[in-house]
Image: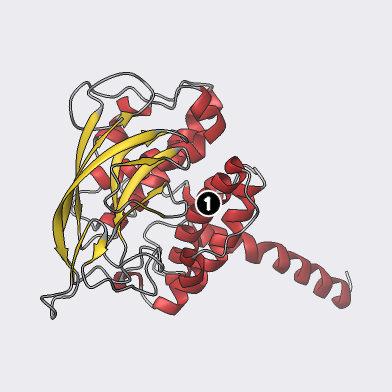
């Protein structure tokens, strides 16, 4: 083979390997590269947003504040913020395209195969992010395995799921849905075999258990998982109590559910046109929506419900909201 032909072959191989190796590195346990970490988070959120836009039959638009800010769930432990944001935006666009065009997604390539207790283990003694990431990757693998076996999606009885903390279980469930296939997951009954008590996982449409949950939403955590699976068009009634302190150095900067009593905004918050500190929600990793002090809301999409604080930086916030949800 001539040197010229060898060079051409080498270039062709490199063009194929680089994208694949990027995916492989992004899926490694406890990836230290902030760009890779951002890509993973962005892909998940973008895919959820694209899928929800497609289900609601709205125009293609991924340029919401999450994409533009590129820093949802960023934590200094991830490394360089700019690199994380760059990876997040790249992953968000790729995920949105896959979700909006109803493609199967690259969850297996990105997240499965991390193995065992690596990358956050079962969530004991780790940060919420590491715990959720570990649960997500293991959930993807479990979902794909059950899909290949044509098994019903009863993942809640698995030891892997039961052994984790709340953040691990939340990540596991989202990952399982993506690995199993969301359409089939919903048709199969959604994998919901919930307890009959007042806590733990719930589904608004299964008719089982007490149809009320009380959720504590801490001011220093951007998003709080509720473990409640909702369906597009559901009407939820809410009762919210509590008050939060937004800035430690300003005793007057407090907020109730409707937002800042000073009626100020936070430009880089999930909803920059809503008051800072307001109670907000999202479904899976989709677009955030306002809740405030409304007595009831209509759920915009199907999936797992999250409650959050509309702020650009929650690290110095104190206090909490107590939210009672009924359906």
Asked if 266 appears above or below 228 in the picture, the reply is below
Instruction: Tell me the quadrant of the picture where the C terminus can be found.
Output: top left
Left or right of residue 41: residue 20: right
Give the camera-side residue of 40 and 3.
Answer: 40
Q: Return the residue at label 1.
A: 49
Q: Residue 182: x and y, percent?
A: 52, 35
Give the camera-side residue of 4 and 245.
Answer: 245
Identify the image's colour scheme: rainbow, by chain, secondary structure or one colour: secondary structure
Left or right of residue 280: residue 126: left
Residue 146 visible in the snapshot: yes
Asked if 295 appears above or below 69 in the picture, the reply is above
Residue 181 visible in the snapshot: no
Instruction: Tell me the crowding category of disc 1: few under 14, some 14 to 19, or many 20 or more residues within 10 angstroms, Cα based.
Output: many
Instruction: Tell me the quadrant of the picture where the N terminus can be found.
Output: bottom right
Kindly give the residue lying farthest to the left in the view shown: 251
Quarter of the figure with residue 15: bottom right
Give the camera-side residue of 70 and 213.
Answer: 213
Asked if 172 appears above or below 256 in the picture, the reply is above
The structure residue drawn at horizontal position 51% and vertical position 70%, both measured from the top left corner, is 68
């Amino acid at each position: 083979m001539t040197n010229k032909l060898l060079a051409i072959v080498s270039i062709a191989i490199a063009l194929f390997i680089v994208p694949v190796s990027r995916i492989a590195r992004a899926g490694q346990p406890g990836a230290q590269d902030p760009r890779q970490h951002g890509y993973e988070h962005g892909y998940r959120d973008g895919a959820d947003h694209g899928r929800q836009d497609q289900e609601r039959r709205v125009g293609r638009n991924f340029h919401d504040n999450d994409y533009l800010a590129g820093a949802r769930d960023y934590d200094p432990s991830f490394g360089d913020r700019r690199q994380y944001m760059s990876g997040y935006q790249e992953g968000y666009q790729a995920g949105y395209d896959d979700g909006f065009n109803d493609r199967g997604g690259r969850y297996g390539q990105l997240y499965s195969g991390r193995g065992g207790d690596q990358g956050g283990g079962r969530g004991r003694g780790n940060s919420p992010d590491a715990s959720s990431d570990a649960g997500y990757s293991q959930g993807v693998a479990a979902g794909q395995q059950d899909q290949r076996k044509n098994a019903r999606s009863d993942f809640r009885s698995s030891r892997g799921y039961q052994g984790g903390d709340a953040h691990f279980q939340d990540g596991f469930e989202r990952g399982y849905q993506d690995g199993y296939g969301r359409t089939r997951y919903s048709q199969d009954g959604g994998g919901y075999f919930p307890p009959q008590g007042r806590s733990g996982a719930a589904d608004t449409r299964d008719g089982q258990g007490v149809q009320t949950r009380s959720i504590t939403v801490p001011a220093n955590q951007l998003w709080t998982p509720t473990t409640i699976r909702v369906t597009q068009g559901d009407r939820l009634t809410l009762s919210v109590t509590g008050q939060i302190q937004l800035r430690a150095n300003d005793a007057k900067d407090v907020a109730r559910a409707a937002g800042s009593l000073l009626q100020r905004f936070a430009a880089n918050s999930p909803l920059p046109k809503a008051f800072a500190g307001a109670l907000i929600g999202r479904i899976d990793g989709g677009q955030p929506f306002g809740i405030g002090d409304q007595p009831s809301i209509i759920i915009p999409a199907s999936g797992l419900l999250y409650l959050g604080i509309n702020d650009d930086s929650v690290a110095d916030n104190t206090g909490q909201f107590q939210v009672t949800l009924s359906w």
